[in-house]
Each structure stands twice: as C-alpha cells, then as structure tokens.
Amino acid sequence: MRIAFNAAFWGARYNGTASVAEGFARCLAGLGHELVMYSPKNHYCDLPQIKWRPTPASLSVGGSALANARRFAWTQTALPFRLRGEGADSGDGESCIESLVNAKEG
C-alpha cells in the first residue's frame, strides 16, 4: 500500500510528536508499505520505502509564531493538490488506519 504522510510540523527539533511520527513511519515501512513523507527535512534517508517530498520550513513547529496558521492553510490548500499526483492509497490518518484494517481483514 502507498501511504502519504504529512509531517510538515517536524522541524529541526526532535520532540514527542516527532518521535511518534517517526515510529509510525518506520513501522509502516517495516511492514512493507511505501510512504510518501511530506516534511521540511529528509529524516528517513536510510529507508528506501520512504520517499521524501519537501515542505516549506516555515510550516514546522518552532518556525515562527505564524507556523500553525501557515501549516493549517498549506494542509487545506496545497497538500490536497500534491496528494492527487502521488497515487497514494491513503492520504490522511483516519483513511490510512481504515485502509490498513480493511487490508488485514481482507
């Protein structure tokens, strides 16, 4: 399964949210899924199953006081257009989990 993963929030600082995102991405890659990771930095250059797509650094946590508003606007406007061209089976967390459950049951 090809899954798009929005990690635009992940900046230079490694925090709890980044730790969860990394564990989730590495677990899915370890299960053989291909991930398209949207983040300002390529955190997964060691895993060939994860394809990196750069996002503006101004969207990451700690980028500025406006980072949350910018990230929300980017997620609602630019990201859907980028996802259409990826051919991902799933592009958001809820659909991703539902797709994985259905794939396991089927």
Image (cartoon, rainbow, N blue to C red):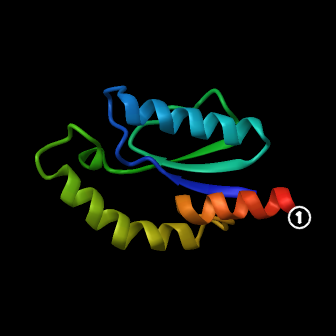
| Count of numbered tags | 1
Residue at the far right: name it: 106
Residue 106, placed above or below residue 52: below
Quick check: 101 above or below 82? above
Image quadrant in which the N terminus is located: bottom right
Left or right of 53, for residue 33: right
Q: Which x, y percent locates residue 30?
A: 74, 35
At label 1, counting other C-alpha atoms closer than 10 Å, the crowd grade (few under 14, some 14-19, many 20 or more) is few
Which quadrant holds the C terminus?
bottom right
Q: What is the x, y in percent for residue 100? A: 73, 57
Q: Position of residue 58 (x, y in %)?
A: 24, 47
Q: Residue furthest left?
A: 65
Observer-nearest of 100 and 51: 100
Q: Using the rendered view, name the quadrant where residue 16 is placed.
A: top left
Seen in the picture, residue 105 relative to 18 is either above or below; the reply is below
Q: How far across and how far down the image is residue 15, in percent?
A: 35, 28
| Residue positioned 78% across, 40% down in the render | 31
Give the residue displayed 64% in from the left and 56% down from the top: 3
**Amino acid bearing label 1:** Gly
Residue at horizontal 49 percent and vertical 67 percent from the top: 82
| Quarter of the rendering containing residue 41 | top left
Q: Quadrant of residue 78?
A: bottom left
Question: Which residue in the structure is indicated by mark 1?
Answer: 106
Residue, x 22% and y 59% (percent of image)?
A: 70
Circle 1 SS class = loop
Q: Is residue 31 left or right of residue 73?
A: right
